[in-house]
Amino acid sequence: MNVYDFSYDYIAFKTEKPCSLFSFLKDQGLSDRFVKNAYRKNLIRVNEMDPPHFGSLKRNDLVKIYYEDENPDPYVEDSADLDIVFENENFLLVNKPAGLAVHPTFSRQDQTLYGKLTGYYKKNNISRSIHLVNRLDIETSGLILVGKNPLFQQQLAKSFIECKVKKEYFALVEGAFEREIFVDKNILDGKDLKMRRTVDPRGKSARTKLVPVFSSKAYSLIKAFPETGRTHQIRVHLAYLGHPILGDSLYGGSRDLIGRSALHAEGLEFLDPFTKKPMSFKASLPADMQTLIDILV
């Protein structure tokens, strides 16, 4: 995308040559669905007017797409304890604690990140739905990216799929992990009720770089850099290597020292699709993992 201007309410582009409206917006990387929806709802303006007949654009035309206000979600919770790492017109970044589910489910309607974000939006008069870009397991703590409009979410989700987002995790694992390892092993979705995944050549491609930070005979602290985004990817690859994450009982990790999977999404790096500026964020380790590291290291 070559963005000319943007705000909380709109995004704008400027033409460089005569062209059609739909081909121009497609060249900006916008999906057909997004453009057609905006056109149908009369959210597109050309030089602050309705689009011209047949959508013919001239050089230096200013094309604006306005975001529509969205209906508030029904799951509204107290947002006082929401840990917001960063926020601007287009997105916010949250440090999710372990034990907090991302989405409401049939069995869990409250105490979710989704509900807390909805409460935060309502409190701050943000008239949008929650556009989650990435997700974390309930036991995993760390950074979750949330778009304030569907276009930002669409563009960043594409970056995740194309492996253009750098993700960095801390994990406490069992056993001596003494050298850097690059794991390139396919992961197959589980078929049992617990949805345990396995390394299997029939699965989808999954690649993870694993770097030791500290290692002893019994326990190690590592950094994990997943290049792909398969469900449970880091957990599966570490269990496959014989180094299950402490507390991760689904993949063989002991709960003697910690009552949840000792995995923390510490860092995110990506290119802002609107400004083209590199963005880099960190989330400090939660108290339970830091305490355990102090004991073991």
Image (cartoon, rainbow, N blue to C red):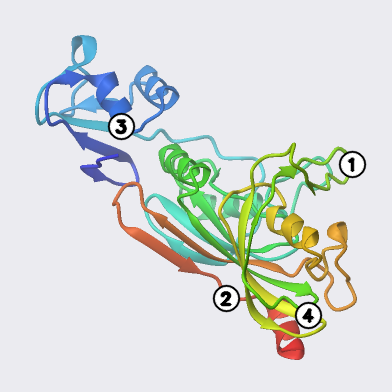
Image coordinates of residue 13 in percent, x first then y, are 22, 36
Q: Mark 4 or 1, which is nearer the eye?
A: 4
Residue that numbered label 3 is attached to: 65
SS at circle 4: strand
Q: Residue at x 67, y 40 (%)?
A: 204
Mark number displayed over residue 284: 2
Work out how far the residue at label 2 is from the one at label 4, CA to CA, in angstroms: 21 Å
SS at circle 3: strand
Of the numbered discs 3 and 2, the one sitting upstream in the chain is 3
Circle 3: is it few (<14), some (14-19), or many (20+) Cα within 10 Å? many
**What residue type is disc 4 on?**
Tyr
**What residue type is disc 1 on?**
Leu
**Left or right position of 247 against 141:** right
Q: Residue at x 30, y 33 (%)?
A: 28
Image quarter (top left, top right, bottom left or bottom right) of the N terminus = top left
Circle 1: is it few (<14), some (14-19), or many (20+) Cα within 10 Å? few
Query: On the image, which quarter does residue 210 sit in?
Result: bottom right
Q: Mark 3 or 2, which is nearer the eye?
A: 2
Mark number displayed over residue 219: 4
Q: Residue at x 25, y 42 (%)?
A: 3
